[in-house]
Amino acid sequence: MTEALLETEAAPETGALLDIADLTLRVPGAARPLLDSVSLSVAPGEVVALVGESGSGKSTTAKAALGLFPPGSTASGSVRFDGTEVLGLTGERLRAHRARSVALIHQDPRAALNPVRRVGDFLVERGATRSSAVELLASVGLPDPERRVRQRPHELSGGMLQRVVIAGALAARPRLLLADEATSALDVTTQADILALLRGLRAEHGLGLLFITHDLHLAAAYCDRVYVMYAGRVVESRTAKALFTTPAHPYTRGLLSCSPTLDTHTPLHPIPGRPPSLTDTFTGCPFTTRCDQAQPTCETWHPEPVRLPDGGTAACVAVTAVGSRAAGRHGWAQPQADGTVKNGATHE
Amino acid sequence: MPLRLLRRLTGVLATLLAASFVIFAAVYAAPGDPAVFLAGGRDKLTPERLAQVRAEYHLDEPLFVQYGRWLWDCLHLDLGRSFKYSDQVADLVAARFPTTLQLVLYATVLFVVLGVGAGVLAAVKRSTWVDSAVVGATTLAASVPSFVAAIALVSLFGVRLGWFPVTGGGSGFLDTVRHLTLPALSLALGALAIVSRVTRQAMADAAASDHVEAARASGVPERDIVRRHVLRNALGPIVTMCGLVMAGMLAGTVVVETAFGLSGIGSLLVGAINTHDFPVAQAVLLLMVTGYIVVTTLVDAVHPLLDPRVKGAAG
Amino acid sequence: MTAIAPPLVPSVRGRRPIGVVLAGTVLALVVIAAVCAPLLAPYAPDTIDLSSSLVGTGRDHLLGTDSSGQDLLSRALYGARSSLIAPLALLAVAAVLGVTLGVLAAWRGGWVDALVSRLTDVMYAFPGLLFTVLIIAVFGAGMTTSVLALGLAFTPTIAKYTRSLALSEARKPYVDAYRVQGMGGLRICARHVVPNLARAVLGYLVVLFGEALMSLATLSYLGFGAQPPSSDWGLMVQEGQAAIVQGAMLPALVPGTAIALVVVCFNVVGVRAADRLGRQ
């Protein structure tokens, strides 16, 4: 894969905080890699979304930024944080990286906190002092912070706990926040509060934010750029606006049209089939079996990110074929009926 | 909370009453005249003795009345008179109880330190040779009855190496410790195996929690993760098991005290049974059962202190 | 798309671990030794020869002799018989009582269930061997009393286990089907429920065997179980203990090692057997 393909307009190669390039992750016993040639970057102050169904590898990708991999797995490619190769870190340096540079906001706050320890202990463990712990809790909008630090997780509500977890993530003053479905378990009003809070913190501290969600609408509305993952691969990477208006990959279009919206009266189109499991292997594009626009070549075409005119990428054979023409016309890349494809042109 | 405590206490009292009744009424299940039995068999029986026993146990009254009387006396530490020693049973037991208590406490220190230590080691070094060695050693330890452990320890450390005395209780602190080391080890061996397994499993369960991974992802030092998250959260099952095992040890002294010729309540019980000294046997059994129930109840009461969720759920 | 079953979790079945094979072999040898004791033993187990008291290992006595000059190897071989059969008998007693009570409690529920569980509670209030010791205190020492008393002491454990199994078994549709056909509760239990539980209970008994053997040996050691001139291992340890201080370890160590060896092997094999029998 060439470097040019990794570049996108919003995150120039040089300034990236997190730069994952061609990351492939294999676990013993799985028929296919957990992650396959994933490339992704987050710049300082940028909000980037990582979207996909469960099992698509989005959490795994985010955890790779922490040097956290499933047991027994082997990784190739590179994960750079501010120029430092994370894959090469071990022992104390890896621990320091996790403690200071990147912080993960866990999906389920109740599971992320040790139930038998106090909220204050949780914050202190992550680099706060006893007094700064109270300030941190106040800064994430938790009322009565002096009392909260002495409480235990079971005494707090889910939304409060999520704020505690965010405070814990901020305790060590990291430069990149990974929010793994950080708002999915919360009710709508709390969700909005937390989202606003995260955006505010990003602006305040100049943090990079990698926002992992299965909700493409939320991602497009909330983030600067969006990566869409499917079966361990990045299938599309666009600016939020471009993705929402002119999705290039059939999977992205499927995701957009299978969630209900208020303003349109278009019927819902669920994506047929189910997400592939780790036991499924592919000879060509993994999405073929569920794709309504699949063509014979899809069975054998090895997916590669194809550069779109607007700077984004999409890994679809149809995009390869029509390229700039489709993007120029409607932005909707339509598959060629006759199936003329420059097969493998981008990677061989 | 008070209601739950009350219910719990009532249950414990009911069990204690039932168990004491079983101990008392066992005599009546024996074939033949309870008076003959209580007098220690037919061999040395004189009519005076028989009359004395009948009077002492009020054998002409209904069973429940006798039981009530016996229980009332027991509560006033009047446990009757030994046939063999013709002493007050309470005095006999009181004289021997300290040795048993020392033995149990010493064994408890040993099995808690070594058992929990081995379990933690195995859990931290999971799936390495250390883990396999601990699991193998504890499987072996759990399969050796305490009297076999006793003779093996005596053979090696007592006779062959001469490090420890092979019999007797000793006087003074250091001498007592020296005398009780091998007995305590024999008593602790099986307990050590159970506790190390429970520790290993509880820590493995605790280590699989999401918050441990979250702590690891936040760069919390591994030492702190093991201490403050894994071990701390595994403490509930570990403490419970240690308490239960310690409570059960009171019964284990029967074997170990016999093996080492220690004069505690365990060997007293064996002697009492062999000489048909039933008042002594009843008293020791009652004491051991009461001790066991009290300790297990205390362990149960401690559990909410270790896990605030339990307290929260109950309140 | 090809689907391949992933061996993500190492299979528990399949290859037997070396330890299990080893333990099984040892147990088989012990059983053969017990059965063929008259053929294998160089002496009768009760041949007293005071002139060769406490002889060490040698050509005449492979494992030496005890203080009465009895050949230890011969005694250990004969002792294997009572040491293995007695736990079996004990478990048989406990299984009959335990399964009956457990199924009864699960089937009838209500006050029967409550009564069984209260009885169980009271027996559990006696730690370790104390319940057995109480019975022996009343009925006197001896192997039969020990086996019956321990059988009674093991009953609550088996009853509790059976009750939990029987509860889920009794909810199965076939039970209702037989009931609708007019079959009586006793018949359904005896013909269907109990046989269906048999495998799991058997697996549980295998696990309990080591414990049963240890308990009986302990009683014999205390003088409550086997009585002289039996060659029961527990009794042999007791008889041999006095010689230890004289420097003769073998009389106590030979039977002691035999006990430990058999129990270890049973525990190793038992866990696996229970696993396989418990899985239907």
Image (spheres, coloured by chain):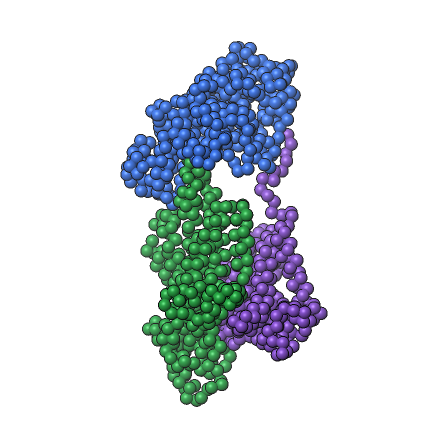
Q: Residue A294 or B233: which is nearer the viewer?
A: B233
Q: Residue at x 52, y 36 (%)?
A: A70
Q: In x, y percent, where is residue C182?
A: 61, 58
Q: In x, y percent, where is residue A212?
A: 46, 28
Shown in purple, the chain is C
Vertical position of residue B89 compared to residue C197: above or below: below
- Outermost residue toward the bottom in this view: B47
- Outermost residue toward the right in this view: C39
Q: Is residue B135 visible?
A: yes
Q: In x, y percent, where is residue B276?
A: 47, 79
Q: Residue B99 or C217: which is nearer the viewer?
A: B99
Vertical position of residue C122 compared to residue A299: above or below: below
Quarter holding residue A94: top left
Shown in blue, the chain is A
Q: Residue at x 51, y 46 (%)?
A: B126
Vertical position of residue A83 compared to residue B227: above or below: above
Q: Quadrant where the N terminus of chain C lies?
A: top right
Q: Residue at x 60, y 51 (%)?
A: C279
Q: Residue B119 or A204: which is nearer the viewer?
A: B119
Q: In x, y percent, where is residue A66?
A: 46, 32
| Relative horizontal placement of residue A27, taking residue B107 as reference (left or right) | right
Shown in green, the chain is B
